[in-house]
Amino acid sequence: MAVAQTSVASGLWPVVATKLVAGALLWAFVLVSVVGSMFPAITVLLARVILDEQIGRVQALGLVLALAAVGLIVGG
């Protein structure tokens, strides 16, 4: 089951990347680039969900700070 979940998750990444590029062409490039820079955070969250890896305190703090930074940048 883990192989199927990993395959599906890795297959979705090109779709998400393509949508971000299309969004960059249609909408504000700054917004799309900021959201696109969150791929490492999404990788950590997928590792938690799919592989049942533990998220350490430093990783959790990094996720919270990254989300706060995106909110500050997008909010202006």
Image: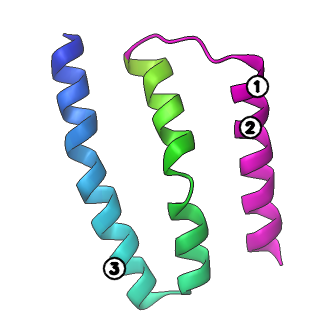
Q: Residue at x 18, y 30 (%)?
A: 7
Quarter holding residue 14: bottom left
Q: Which residue is mark 1?
A: 58
Packing grade of label 2 (10 A; few <14, some 14-19, many >=20) is few
Sequence-first disc among 3 and 2 = 3
User: What is the magenta range?
Assistant: 51-76
Q: Residue at x 58, y 11 (%)?
A: 54
- Left or right of 28: which side holds 17? left
The label nearer to you, 3 versus 2, is 2
Q: Residue at x 41, y 78 (%)?
A: 23
- Left or right of 57: which side holds 13? left
> Which secondary structure class fits the magenta region best?
helix
Identify which amino acid the numbered label 1 is placed on.
Answer: Val
Packing grade of label 1 (10 A; few <14, some 14-19, many >=20) is few
Rendered location of residue 32, percent (x, y): 53, 73
The dot on residue 62 is 2
- Left or right of 35: which side holds 68? right
From the viewer's perspective, is residue 27 above or below residue 59? below
Q: Residue at x 79, y 32 (%)?
A: 61
Sequence-first disc among 1 and 3 = 3
Q: Which residue is mark 3?
A: 22
The dot on residue 42 is none
From the viewer's perspective, is residue 28 above or below residue 9? below
- Left or right of 56: which side holds 28? left
Identify which amino acid the numbered label 3 is placed on.
Answer: Ala
